[in-house]
Image: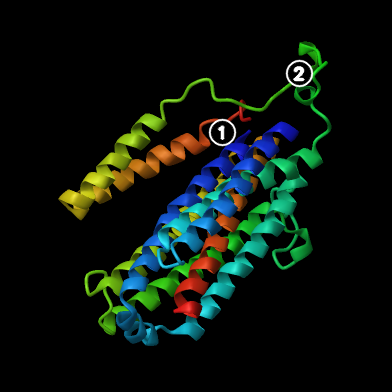
Amino acid sequence: MKVEYKLFMIVGAFFVPVGVIYGIVTDWAEPVGPVALLLAAGLGGMIAFYLWATARKLPARPEDDPAAHISEAEGEYGFFSPHSWWPLPLAAAASLCFLGLAVGWWLFIIGAVFGAVALIGWTFEYFTGDSAV
Amino acid sequence: MVSVGTIVWLSSELMFFAGLFAMYFTIRGVSHDLWAEKTTILNVPFATVNTLVLVISSVWCQLGVHAAEHGKAHRGDAKLFNVSSWGMREWYVLTYIFGAIFVSGQVLEYSELVHEGVTLASDAYGSVFYLTTGFHAMHVTGGLLAFLLIIGRTFTTRTYSHNQAAGAVVTSYYWHFVDVVWIALFATIYLLK
């Protein structure tokens, strides 16, 4: 996973000097720039660190070997939902909640009830019954 | 796969809080007198204890992750007070309790500040105080709901699968992230003033 974490390390390493230069040029009197730039370094650094830490735990992958064969990448990659209707009612409930903030709390409560049902439905969709993953 | 997606999303959450921090520092920079006056109202010892509660909850959460990674969903037939037998469920319930205490402490603190006349609409200080800590408290509350769902999942299946453990682990990522953000917020609001 060298390529992945190096890619994000570049993002992290780039924004540190940029943030410091920005701070020096503006005499540290303008706080938005340094905060945003240094935390953008955190954005890259966080993902880079995670990928690096994961890479240490995993054995070498065929993706890292230029001479690898396609067949080496076979096997299970995890569970992916083939389709799900639950995000749709959840999104509808969320928009009801946001509309409720503008219209009135009674609408927010209705949205929250529908949202709770949709959220539970989505989270438990593949974790009940005999076919649980 | 789930965990990589969570980390990428959390990095975008970092930028969301970057916006809040930038807002706080900007308004603080232009209204020194207001800060000098209002920060004396803050109850720093109370907030320190509350911060400790949240930090300790992260420790319980990590112990839950340890159990989840070893496929131990719950304590089984063991007695509740036999802590060494605890699985992910018991540790996450303890994390939930600590997280709930933290949010309740926030509510108590808000009510005291409102009595002192600091509200969302009172002045610039009130606005940025409630926006930063309020958005954080909403994240903590969201984390508490996530814990409920993750704990609930352990009751609906016969076996504790790898996918269940993955869900528990990414919830812990989120919880630790929210914890770290709070430490930064606490240092900014209560220590730097």
Relative to A15, say whether B104 is above or below: below
Q: Nearer the viewer, residue B170 or B40?
A: B40
Q: Amino acid at mark 2?
A: Ala
Is residue A12 visible in this depiction of the protein? Answer: yes
Quadrant housing the N terminus of chain A = top right
Question: Quarter of the image holding residue A81?
Answer: top right
Return the x and y of residue B46 as percentages of the image width and height: 48, 82
SS state under label 2: helix
Return the x and y of residue A48 as percentages of the image width and height: 66, 43
SS state under label 1: loop
Q: Amino acid at mark 1?
A: Thr
Quadrant housing the C terminus of chain A = top right
Colour mode of the rendering: rainbow
Left or right, A63 with respect to A17, comes to right
Q: Residues within 10 Å of mark 1 (few under 14, many from 20)?
A: some
Relative to B110, say whether A93 is above or below: above
Relative to A72, say whether B29 is above or below: below
Left or right, A71 with respect to B37, comes to right
Q: Earlier in the sequence, mark 1 or mark 2?
A: 2
Identify the residue shown where x is 76% and y is 12%: A70
Residue A73: assigned label: 2
Q: Residues within 10 Å of mark 2 (few under 14, many from 20)?
A: few
Return the x and y of residue A102 as percentages of the image width and height: 18, 50
- Residue identified by numbered label 1: A128
Host chain of mark 1 = A
Identify the residue shown where x is 69% and y is 52%: B65
Return the x and y of residue B142 as percentages of the image width and height: 45, 53
Dot 1 and dot 2 within a common chain = yes
